[in-house]
Image (spheres, rainbow, N blue to C red):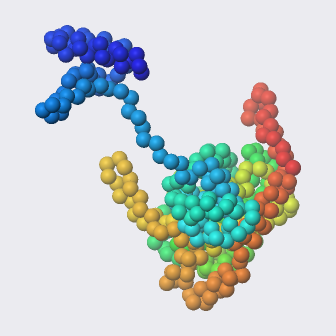
């Protein structure tokens, strides 16, 4: 930079005294030597070293030096980042927009636990930290968690699909309360061969109430058992079940069961994954984020997974806030999205006019029995024990001429 400044001071004098053709040659040579943009080069050559009157007696010599950037004091230092990451990892790995209201509502209870108490100074900063600052501080932690798994959805028979009505994304929203979207997540460790566990995720579109059930495999016997338990245990009514086009849901057995229960069975349109987007989002945000991508199988795998889900579902539905999209406005190539105020599924159900008073009283009494820190500790203990129940991943050979790729073994 210093060499460029010296060259600019020498070239500027020649440039201002040269004729038009001479200026062009000088400018081309100067740009080639410095790498400056053409308009910027014209500006500094026309003004560098020029004497400018700033009054009757005051004259100013124009020079182009490196601008000193303003420095700001660091408010959210490493201590705040470490304390924030510890709480973030313990409570659902939420984004800044959702983690901010959760932190403001529960920081007093959280810091009472010695493990999460960072001191009065750091606690005071956590009380007023913004959502954007949370995302900025946690960006390195989020980057370490990115990974992608496999998909095991097999299309259902065409003649059965014709018997089940298809609903689009917007039609699902218009149905109101009582519509639950369902989907399966497989825990194969990266190799979809053999038998392994699945997670059935069921979530209501209107209130975002979500439940998880660990399955031994995706046979209808286990899907039926999980759905039967969901209909009897979920606090909100189940009127419609909406799934993708996988054969584990689109079959005669599930159609018959739904008719017996008085439930309408619907499906997504072919190759339209967004029609089932509410539960698809939960697969990553709730299952993969906590359970991960290890391989689990058998009764021991089901028991270990279900222990995690028992405590996590209570935390998610009663303490973790979520946002719903209100509107989208397109301006040229940009889309501006507007979201509502972050609320927990419990708060959404309590504020809904469709929720009966009996259900509201039941939800209030159940929440009084819950303790945030106790549920978090039990879930963390279950998560810590979970890898010990994982199974070795079978060798995966994609080509007979290639050497087998071992994904690793656990447990």
- Which residue is outermost to the bottom? 358
Q: Residue at x 51, y 81 (%)?
A: 351
Quarter of the image for residue 210 reads bottom right
Compared to residue 208, the image places residue 301 above or below, namely: above
Number of numbered markers: 0
Q: From the viewer's side, name the closer residue of 264 and 125.
A: 125
Relative placement, left or right, of 54 versus 171 is left
Quarter of the image for residue 118 reads bottom right
Q: From the viewer's side, name the closer residue of 156 and 231.
A: 231
Q: Residue at x 37, y 13 (%)?
A: 33
Q: Residue at x 61, y 60 (%)?
A: 121
Compared to residue 136, the image places residue 167 above or below, namely: below
Relative placement, left or right, of 64 versus 206 is left
Could you say where residue 222 lies in the image, as x and y percent from the top left?
A: 77, 66
Q: Residue at x 57, y 60 (%)?
A: 125
Could you say where residue 266 lies in the image, as x and y percent from the top left?
A: 56, 68
Q: Is residue 347 visible?
A: yes
- Which residue is outermost to the front? 57
Could you say where residue 10 lies in the image, as x and y percent from the top left?
A: 29, 13
Could you say where residue 29 lies in the image, as x and y percent from the top left?
A: 31, 11
Q: From the viewer's side, name the closer residue of 264 and 316.
A: 316
Q: Is residue 266 visible?
A: no
| Quadrant that contains the N terminus | top left
Relative placement, left or right, of 370 versus 386 is left
Compared to residue 162, the image places residue 82 above or below, namely: above
């Amino acid at each position: 930079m210093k060499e460029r400044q010296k060259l600019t001071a020498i070239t500027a004098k020649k440039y201002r005294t040269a004729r038009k053709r001479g200026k062009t040659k000088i400018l081309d040579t100067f740009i080639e030597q410095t790498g400056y943009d053409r308009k910027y080069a014209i500006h500094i050559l026309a003004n560098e070293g020029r004497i400018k009157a700033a009054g009757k007696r005051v004259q100013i010599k124009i020079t182009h030096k490196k601008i000193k950037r303003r420095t700001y004091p660091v408010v959210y230092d490493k201590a705040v980042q470490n304390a924030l990451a510890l709480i973030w990892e313990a409570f659902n790995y939420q984004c800044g927009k959702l983690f901010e209201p959760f932190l403001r509502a529960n920081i007093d209870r959280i810091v009472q636990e010695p493990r999460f108490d960072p001191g009065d100074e750091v606690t005071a900063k956590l009380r007023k930290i913004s959502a954007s600052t949370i995302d900025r501080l946690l960006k390195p932690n989020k980057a370490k968690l990115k990974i992608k798994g496999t998909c095991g959805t097999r299309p259902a028979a065409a003649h059965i699909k014709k018997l089940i009505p298809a609903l689009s994304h917007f039609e699902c929203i218009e149905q109101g309360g009582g519509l639950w979207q369902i989907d399966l997540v497989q825990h194969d460790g990266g190799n979809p061969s053999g038998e392994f566990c699945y997670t059935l995720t069921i979530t209501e579109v209107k209130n975002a109430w979500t439940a998880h059930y660990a399955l031994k495999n995706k046979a209808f016997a286990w899907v039926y058992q999980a759905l039967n338990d969901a209909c009897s245990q979920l606090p909100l009514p189940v009127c419609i079940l909406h799934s993708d086009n996988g054969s584990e849901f689109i079959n005669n057995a599930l159609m018959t069961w739904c008719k017996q229960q008085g439930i309408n069975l619907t499906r997504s349109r072919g190759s339209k994954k967004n029609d089932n987007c509410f539960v698809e989002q939960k697969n990553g945000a709730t299952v993969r984020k906590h359970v991960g991508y290890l391989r689990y199988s058998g009764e021991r795998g089901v028991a270990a997974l279900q222990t995690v889900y028992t405590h996590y579902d209570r935390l998610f539905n009663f303490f973790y806030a979520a946002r719903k999209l209100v509107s989208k406005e397109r301006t040229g190539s940009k889309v501006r999205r507007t979201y509502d105020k972050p609320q927990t599924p419990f708060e959404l159900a309590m504020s809904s006019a469709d929720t009966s008073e009996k259900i509201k009283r039941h939800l209030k009494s159940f929440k009084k029995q819950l303790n945030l820190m106790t549920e978090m500790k039990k879930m963390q203990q279950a998560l810590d024990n979970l890898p010990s129940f994982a199974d070795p991943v079978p060798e995966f050979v994609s080509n007979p001429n290639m050497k087998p790729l071992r994904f690793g073994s656990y447990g």
